[in-house]
């Protein structure tokens, strides 16, 4: 009881400043936790592998994987694989996203189109594009086009569904404003529907980006003779597990990089949020 | 000699029908509003006043009846609406919001800039013109809404409870600002409100509406000379008795609809 009384006599600013310092410290500790978890796993892995507690043939120590990465990199072959995979991802991504955005906006704006296309999209969405890969290979051959089409196919669905949802959830009052101030359908499309749907649309693109990476690896494993997926698959078959891990780490790295790039675009595209 | 009506509404009826049940939002509404007149439509919520405004704004079609807004200049839009606070478009800057109507009509760039600048200055938002609405207070958003409608230079202005969401101090300030902008242009205004004070301060004429079915039950002229201030309206004995009269009337309405 006495201590509390003493407390009251303190300068309130000092008390609050102490509290603020404590909060700062806590948030910094949390940041530290975020960074420490991957580092902790890597150290644990290294330790277990080096001491032979896990089989080093299946789980080679991370430092050795880094070494393998450097030797593969100096030979130049690695960058060819990376380059071709990135090209396929980019091309497939654009081929999937652009039609999805256009059709999605139209479906969102015009309900007859929405009613016509929704059942088709709902029915086609659950089929994994990878399951169609044999058909795609027959149609487009074993060349680049088949990989690009596979990626486009899997990116298309999350983007179109989010675009339609983005348009249909725009607050009605903005539609009223546009109508009252005499917007024609072109202005309606570009000034209201597109910017209004953009936040939800970008979530869909984010999802599409993740799916594109999943798809490219699997597609290159099944029907390709280059690319990161091919690298992973052939290394695995030849029991070159360090090389395989290099491929896996690369995929993880690019996934993270693409997410960061998209977040950056989001801040640029949505200054009003 | 009476001047011809700027807005004339004849036998306007609106029924909302939905699977077996129907609501008569408006029943046989007749009204004439003179050029330059400021009319407040006053009534309890759900009395159909918003429906009437939305019909005039061509956002809703009447079931039967008609209305005419007389056109003075060919190039002018017939009407522009001052929406509620949410009506400011969040992905456009303050300037783009104010210029919205002018841009939609593809007017020359220089003209758009001149008019936009003029009204931005009128509502005191010049230095905020590049901001997005999320950075504005409620009162500033409503200034954007008002500037957008005036900049569009329509034949008549429709206002849908524009100050309903503001705190009382901001409301008084904006009401007086609105009056000062309006007094320059002398546009015909149809203003919706459920606040008796607001109606007394702003209007030349108050039209009282009843609910279910929405119909006009009474009219009251406000003879007080302009420019008016809130203090004067509060101090005026005639208006105080008008307040009581309107209140008694509305009270009966609300009580009556409860029975």
Image (cartoon, coloured by chain):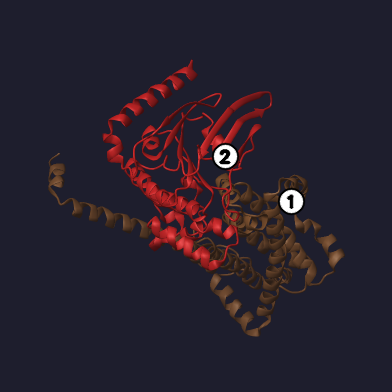
Q: For residue B109, what is the image quadrant?
A: bottom right
Check if mark 2 and mark 1 are on a common chain: no
Residue named by callout 2: B54
How crowded pointer 1 is (Cα within 10 Å; few <14, some 14-19, many 20+) is rated as some
Instruction: Residue A93 in the image: state x and y as whole percent.
Output: 69, 65
Name the residue rendered at 39%, 43% in the picture.
B166
| Tint of chain A | brown
Nearest the eye: B117 or A137: B117
Is residue A48 rendered to the left or right of residue A136?
left
> Quick one: SS at disc 2?
helix
Which of the chains is red?
Answer: B
How far is the residue under mark 2 from the one under mark 1? 41 Å
Nearest the eye: A153 or B79: B79
Whether the residues at callouts 2 and 1 have beta carbons within 8 Å, the answer is no
User: Which numbered disc covers residue A125?
Assistant: 1
Name the residue rendered at 71%, 48% in the picture.
A110
**A170 lies above or below B100:** above
**Which callout, 2 or 1, points to the residue nearer the camera?**
2
Instruction: Residue A97 in the image: state x and y as whole percent.
Output: 68, 61
How many numbered marks does the figure carry?
Answer: 2
Is residue B73 rendered to the left or right of residue B254?
right
Furthest-right residue in this view: A138
**B251 lies above or below A154:** above
Is residue B208 rendered to the left or right of residue A103?
left
Instruction: Residue B138 in the image: state x and y as whole percent.
Output: 40, 48
Q: For residue B129, what is the image quadrant?
A: bottom left
> Quick one: SS at disc 1?
loop
């Amino acid at each position: 009881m006495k201590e509390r009384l003493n407390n009251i006599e303190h300068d309130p600013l000092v008390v609050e400043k102490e509290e603020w310092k404590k909060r700062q410290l806590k948030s910094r500790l949390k940041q530290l936790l975020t960074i420490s978890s991957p580092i902790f796993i890597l150290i644990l892995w290294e330790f277990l592998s080096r001491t032979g507690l896990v089989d080093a043939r299946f789980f080679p120590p991370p430092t050795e994987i880094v070494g393998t990465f450097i030797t593969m990199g100096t030979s130049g072959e690695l960058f060819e694989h990376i380059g071709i995979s990135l090209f396929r991802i980019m091309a497939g991504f654009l081929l999937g996203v652009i039609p999805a955005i256009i059709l999605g906006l139209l479906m969102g704006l015009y309900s007859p189109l929405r009613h016509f296309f929704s059942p088709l999209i709902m029915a086609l969405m659950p089929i994994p594009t990878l399951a169609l890969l044999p058909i795609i290979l027959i149609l487009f051959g074993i060349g680049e086009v088949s990989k690009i089409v596979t990626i486009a196919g899997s990116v298309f669905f999350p983007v179109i569904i989010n675009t339609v949802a983005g348009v249909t959830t725009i607050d009605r009052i903005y539609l009223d404003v546009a109508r009252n101030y005499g917007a024609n359908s072109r202005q309606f499309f570009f000034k209201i529907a597109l910017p209004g749907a953009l936040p939800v649309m970008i979530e869909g693109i984010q999802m599409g980006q993740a799916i594109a990476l999943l798809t490219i690896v699997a597609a290159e494993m099944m029907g390709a003779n280059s690319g990161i997926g091919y690298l992973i698959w052939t290394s695995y078959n030849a029991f070159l597990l360090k090389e395989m891990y290099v491929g896996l780490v690369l995929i993880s790295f690019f996934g993270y990089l693409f997410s960061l790039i998209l977040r950056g675009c989001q801040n640029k595209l949505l200054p009003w949020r | 000699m009476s001047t011809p009506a700027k807005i004339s509404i004849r036998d306007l009826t609106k029924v909302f029908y939905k699977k077996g049940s129907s609501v008569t939002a408006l029943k046989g509404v007749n009204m004439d509003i003179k050029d330059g007149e400021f009319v407040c439509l006053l009534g309890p919520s759900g009395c159909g006043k918003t429906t009437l405004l939305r019909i005039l704004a061509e956002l809703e079609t009447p079931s039967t009846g008609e209305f005419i807004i007389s056109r003075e200049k060919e190039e002018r839009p017939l009407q522009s609406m001052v929406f509620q606070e949410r009506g400011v478009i969040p992905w456009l800057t303050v300037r783009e919001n104010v210029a919205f109507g002018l841009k939609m009509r593809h007017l020359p760039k220089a003209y758009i800039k001149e008019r936009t600048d003029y009204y931005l200055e009128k509502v005191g938002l010049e230095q905020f013109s590049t901001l997005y609405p999320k950075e504005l207070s409620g009162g500033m958003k409503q200034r954007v809404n008002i500037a957008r409608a005036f900049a569009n230079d329509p034949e008549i202005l429709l206002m849908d409870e524009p100050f309903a969401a503001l705190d009382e101090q901001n409301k008084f300030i904006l009401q007086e600002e609105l009056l000062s902008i309006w007094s320059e242009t002398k546009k015909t205004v149809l203003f919706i409100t459920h606040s008796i004070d607001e109606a007394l301060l702003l209007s030349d004429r108050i039209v009282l509406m009843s609910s279910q079915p929405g119909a006009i039950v009474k009219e009251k002229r406000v003879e007080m000379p302009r420019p008016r201030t809130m203090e004067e309206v509060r101090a005026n004995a005639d208006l105080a008795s008008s307040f009581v009269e309107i209140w008694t009337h509305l009270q009966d309405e609300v009580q009556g609809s409860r029975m």
